[in-house]
Image (tube, rainbow, N blue to C red):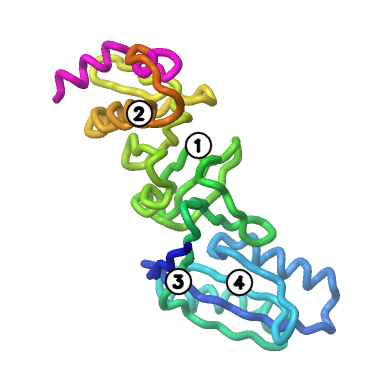
Amino acid sequence: MSTVHSVVSNDLRVIVCIEFDHRAAPDDLAACRAAIVSCPSVLHSVELSGTFDFMFEATVPDMEAYQQQLRSCSGALAKFASRYEANFVCKRFVRARGAERAIWVPSADGFMRIDCSAIDKVSAEGDYVCIQSEGRPWMLHTTMAKMLERLGEDFVKVHRSTIIRCGFIERLGQEGRVWTARLADGSSERIATSQVVRVIAKLRTNSSTSGPARSKRDQLGEPAAITQRKSQTLTAVK
């Protein structure tokens, strides 16, 4: 069973289809495609067979920015393209199949699928988010709020600019009023004061609903690594 969701972007999305001038040198055409793919505003691109040879989707903040970018690449278009068409995206329809959760991110040769279970951490990077998966970073143009909604229950927001997979957190530490989450890769992330109670409750719930039943000490201590003192703090806050 699948569900279709309609999505409206806050930015301006444009899909450009290009028919290359086949009289151009193959190396020049390859360099042109590579330049398009590596452009920061290009979300994904595909090679085509048919009326057009190449298509890409790009994101721009507004129409003025689009016109500026169009003028900046007009020389390349005149040199390598015999024809091109641009269309603006009004609404996107996304089909979600069953309980499958994945994020599609732009890559060097198009678009890549990353299972949410393989994502360790997400950090805000201006108008983008940086997705950390198996030691590799991937940039995606979206908001942290949308990412948290798409990632699901296995993730927790520790700061307004940081989301972490619960299973990637090895220990919570406290020094005075400062709480930190120590991660499986050895790094640490500070937990916002406003998120401390929620993070502790989330990790306790997550550990109790995954795998075989364990004692309360096992859930609050090693290996989940939330100490008994933190449990007492949570009780005091409540």
Q: Are marks 3 and 4 in contact (CB under 8 Å)?
A: no
Residue 221, magenta (yes or no): yes
First in sequence: mark 3 vs mark 1: 3
Magenta residues (range): 218-238
Q: Secondary structure at mark 2?
A: helix
Q: Residue at x 47, y 25 (%)?
A: 183
x and y, in percent, of residue 168 in the image: 48, 30
- Residue that carries the numbered disc 4 in the rendered image: 56
Residue 233, magenta (yes or no): yes
Vertical arrangement, residue 143 with respect to residue 211, above or below:
below
Instruction: Please tell me whether mark 4 or mark 1 is closer to you in this view.
Output: 1
Amino acid at circle 3: Phe
Instruction: Please tell me whether mark 1 or mark 2 is closer to you in this view.
Output: 2
- Residue that carries the numbered disc 2 in the rendered image: 203
| Residue 202 lies in quadrant | top left
Instruction: Residue 79: tell me if it is visible.
Output: no
Q: Secondary structure at mark 3?
A: strand
- Residue that carries the numbered disc 1 in the rendered image: 120
First in sequence: mark 3 vs mark 4: 4
| Residue 75 lies in quadrant | bottom right
